[in-house]
């Protein structure tokens, strides 16, 4: 695939290559049946890859010499924008004005933008981009003003997160100078909630809405974590991030524990060595 793309980009006639995905990793394995196998798959589904590879021979002929293409890489876009952009590319280099903005049918306040001719606003909302609220990952989170109050759903999310982290830790063999205690939280410093999120697929019986919570907390071993939990009757981890500096491989049970989940305190090793 890489060679094919390179070939197109180096041809005399300018070719634009569009790379668009339709779902996240783990789709074929039905990730929702084993979310621990593919944590984060739902977010990949709601934020699929969308990229345009534009040859240098064409960049110079674009508005602002391609500057919009660069800036818009880090902005919120939707399939409506990609469609309008490709439609305008097919018309180039024909003379005449292009429609760089177009209202999205049946979505008041939403419009598609030509990504090569218009700068996407930095504060663009999902509504303006034509993304439904229940599929919005950018603007639907609600910040808890008092995260340390430890509401019931926060406590439940912490229990699920800690159980998940500790299940990944492989204990060192007997007699090892390394000690890997169970990770326990010390305090919660950030909580966000999102109601009515599409947590399954868009069609069939899998399409459903569930509440979600994002909890950032400090834990033993001087570690910091962010857990994103789907709040169901049996809550489950959708995504887990280690926000602290990763520990050395030597402290992770001879490499059996993934670095992300290594919370072994290296002070135990230093004390043994001295």
Image: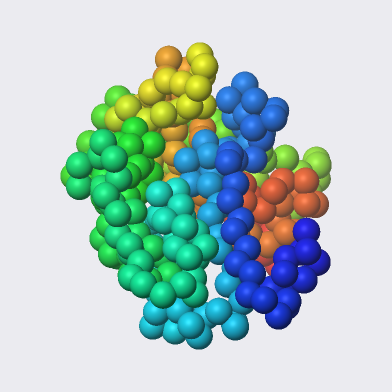
**Which quadrant holds the N terminus?**
bottom right
Quadrant containing the C terminus in the rendered view = bottom right
In the rendered image of this protein, does residue 155 appear above or below residue 220? above
Asked if residue 174 lies left or right of residue 194, the reply is right
Q: Look at 38% across and 36% down and name the residue there.
A: 135
The colouring scheme, among rainbow, by chain, secondary structure or one colour, is rainbow
Whether residue 223 can be seen here:
no
Residue 101 on image: x %, y %:
30, 60
Q: Nearer the viewer, residue 180 or 148?
A: 148
Q: Residue 31's spot in the image, x, y percent?
A: 62, 29
* Residue depicted at x 26% and y 36%: 106
Location of residue 157 (image quadrant) = top left
Picture residue at 45% right of the left edge, 79% below the top: 62
168 vs 115: above or below: above
Give the side of residue 190 with respect to residue 228, left or right: left
Residue ranking furthest to the front: 95
């Amino acid at each position: 695939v890489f060679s094919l793309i390179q070939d197109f980009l180096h041809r005399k006639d300018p070719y634009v290559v569009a790379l668009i995905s339709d779902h996240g990793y783990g789709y074929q394995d039905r990730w929702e049946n084993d979310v621990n196998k593919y944590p984060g798959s739902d977010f990949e589904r709601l934020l699929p890859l969308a990229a345009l590879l534009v040859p240098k021979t064409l960049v110079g002929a674009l508005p602002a010499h391609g500057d919009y293409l660069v800036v818009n890489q880090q902005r919120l876009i939707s399939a409506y924008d990609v469609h309008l952009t490709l439609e305008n590319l097919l018309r180039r280099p024909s003379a005449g004005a292009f429609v760089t903005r177009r209202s999205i049918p049946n979505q008041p306040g939403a419009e598609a933008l030509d990504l090569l001719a218009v700068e996407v606003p930095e504060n663009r909302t999902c509504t303006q981009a034509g993304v439904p609220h229940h599929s919005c990952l950018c603007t639907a989170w609600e910040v808890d003003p008092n995260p340390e109050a430890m509401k019931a759903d926060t406590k439940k999310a912490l229990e699920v997160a800690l159980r998940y982290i500790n299940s990944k830790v492989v204990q060192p063999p007997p007699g090892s100078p390394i000690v890997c205690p169970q990770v326990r939280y010390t305090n919660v410093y950030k909580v966000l909630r999102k109601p009515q999120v599409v947590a399954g697929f868009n069609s069939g019986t899998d399409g459903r809405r569930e509440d979600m919570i994002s909890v950032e907390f400090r834990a033993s071993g001087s570690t910091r974590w962010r857990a994103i939990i789907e709040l169901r009757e049996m809550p489950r981890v959708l995504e887990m991030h280690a926000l602290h500096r990763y520990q050395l491989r030597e402290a992770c049970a001879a490499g059996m524990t993934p670095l992300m989940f290594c919370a072994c305190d290296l002070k135990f090793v230093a004390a043994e060595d001295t």
